[in-house]
Image (cartoon, grey):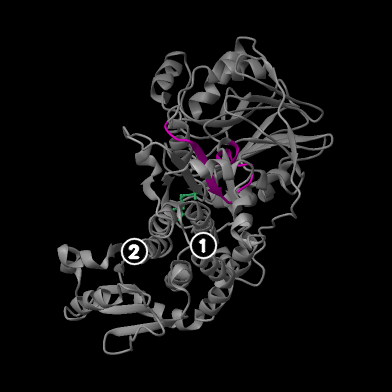
Amino acid sequence: MCGIVAAAARREVSEILLEGLRRLEYRGYDSAGMALINDQNVLQIHKRNGKVKELEAAQAQEPFYGNTGIAHTRWATHGKPSTENAHPHASGGRVALVHNGIIENHAELRAELIAAGYEMSSATDTEVIAHLLHLSLQKGASLRAAMQNTIARLEGAYALAAIDIESPHTVVGARKGSPLVVGVGIGENFLASDQMALRQVTDSFIYLEEGDLVEISPASIQICTIDGEAIERPTTRIKEALETSDMGDFDHYMIKEIFEQPVALEATLAGAANVEQVEECFGHGASAMFDRVTNVQIVACGTSYHAGMVARYWLEELAGISCEVEVASEFRYRKRVQHEGTLLVAISQSGETADTLAALRNATEGEFIGSLVVANVDNSSLVRECDLVFLTRAGAEIGVASTKAFTTQLVAMLMLTLALGRRRGMTDERQSEIIEALENLPHYVRQTLELNGAIQKLSEAFIPKRHALFLGRGIQYPIAMEGALKLKEISYIHAEAYPAGELKHGPLALVDDDMPVVAVAPNDELLEKLKSNLEEVRSRGGELFVFADREAGFANEDRVQVLPMPHCPEVIKPIVYTVALQLLSYHVALQKGTDVDKPRNLAKSVTVE
Ligand code: M6R
């Protein structure tokens, strides 16, 4: 959510900053800007409403250069997307600053600064930070001291990077509540909100901790507390190959990522050929902690929350362990009563989602026996702060709509079910069945991907529609929810999911011949009940699109289109059916001409509350 890149180098950095923004754009794309200090020590700024390509065009038209600079791609919180509200924000022609996060006391600071003679030129909460810095610099503070003075006045969350023409080779940054990393170069150093922005220039990173302040120059990196006390932070060398943001032969990241799922699932499953090995995937100390678990509390947001909802069925039914699942933004503000022996499980693709992180931090002493995160990004905040970590191996997910991250999260949660289940009497036979189903999962996902053409055809019926209903029963209810989220997120069709049995308690009133109803119908014990629910829809003129097991006995008929799904083991059906629903959303969005990878108003990583 918003992206920051900054550089202090001995070479020209405008292209490095722009490339960093291109790599970060999936996190926010309302407007973009860049500020550089040139060799005459003059501050130059380009800001543009719209995507990074608008900023590139501005730079191509009126190029400017420098060795020290900051850049930003924005996802609007305070103030609409516009050139004025784009970052960097400058003050007194001297200092410029970029910010991720939200400053809660901005109104009070704004009034104070206006009284001190500052003119506001934006509606953002960020501009006050630039003026506070300027005020402090004008009183003679160094850039670092000015940053210390400034952040002492801020309430809320921030990752910041600032430059000052009086310190033309330095960038100062600070973090609280929003991530910031230092990219360590040779004769040059960088800051970014996500290491991915800097993989083009370095593979060495220092992950700043909450409350850290950092000053970088081409030759040095100094980290200290807000009180100026020096701190050492380790440098981590990233080993894996550069994760390019290359779309290959695909038209969008989303479809590329949907098709990457067999490989992502294989990578996530690698090495888990038996239950003992499954446990090793959760890291050192997992076994001892799992021995003490009697309950599970899952917290997550969006798609990751749906993964948690599926996991509840598995944990309770297969492992016999009680499980609660809650949206992190609610959990964090609720007075809670936990059972003894509860493990807190956070699920987050990015590992940076502010609400999920806050839920973890909000856990009180002794409330949980420990914390586990299922994340896709190593070294992310949740990964660093949880006791146990399961890293899904989905690879970088660029499309805002989560696809391969979700299915690999489900694999992780099924592996947790195995690990906890064997402690609660899950039979060896059952364990082997689940492991075998997991091993065969990539095969069934490949079979589902072969339905791409048929799903594309089916998707045509949705183009003129404004609403859609998704139905599922049991463990397929959260899959229906995920299908509805995917459709609304990228095609802007209003979609809602219901457990099919709830239909007659209200939503049936919405059903008419203009309401497509998608049903997730594996051949499970609830099939007959689901069939009755679907009849309720049909008899009211609703048009049904049934994703059904080949052997479930559904056939195409008037106002019923059936997509025959591979017949696969029960336990992995939620994962397999998800893939088909992802394809449905993708094709609907494609035909509606929306921006599939960067849907309006959304951002990949939601690092604000
Ligand atoms: O990075 P996280 O998994 O914590 O993100 C949570 C949600 O913001 C995310 O899943 C969101 O709902 C996706 N855009 C859905 O496709």
Q: Quadrant of residue 3?
A: top right
Dot 1 or dot 2, earlier in sequence:
1
Which contiguous range is marked in magenta? Answer: 367-384
Q: Residue at x 67, y 43 (%)?
A: 195
Kindly tell me whether residue 608 is visible in this rendering.
no
| Above or below, comparing residue 20 to residue 551 in the picture | above
Q: Residue at x 75, y 49 (%)?
A: 200
Tell me if the residue at label 2 has its CB under 8 Å from ligand 1.
no
Q: Amino acid at mark 2?
A: Tyr
For label 2, the crowd category at 10 Å Cα-Cα, with few meaning under 14, some 14 to 19 and many 20 or more, is many
Q: Residue at x 51, y 62 (%)?
A: 407
| 529 vs 358, nearest the viewer | 529
On the rendered structure, is 174 left or right of 39? left
Q: Quadrant of residue 364?
A: top left
Local secondary structure at mark 1: helix
Q: Amino acid at mark 1?
A: Thr
Q: Is residue 282 magenta?
A: no
Pointer 1 residue: 407
Which quadrant, please, contains the C terminus? Answer: top left
On the rendered structure, is 353 left or right of 71? left
| 126 vs 355, nearest the viewer | 355
Q: Is residue 372 magenta?
A: yes
- Point out which mark residue 587 bears: none
Local secondary structure at mark 2: helix
Pointer 2 residue: 477
Q: Position of residue 136 (x, y in %)?
A: 58, 14
Q: Position of residue 268 (x, y in %)?
A: 61, 59
For label 1, the crowd category at 10 Å Cα-Cα, with few meaning under 14, some 14 to 19 and many 20 or more, is many
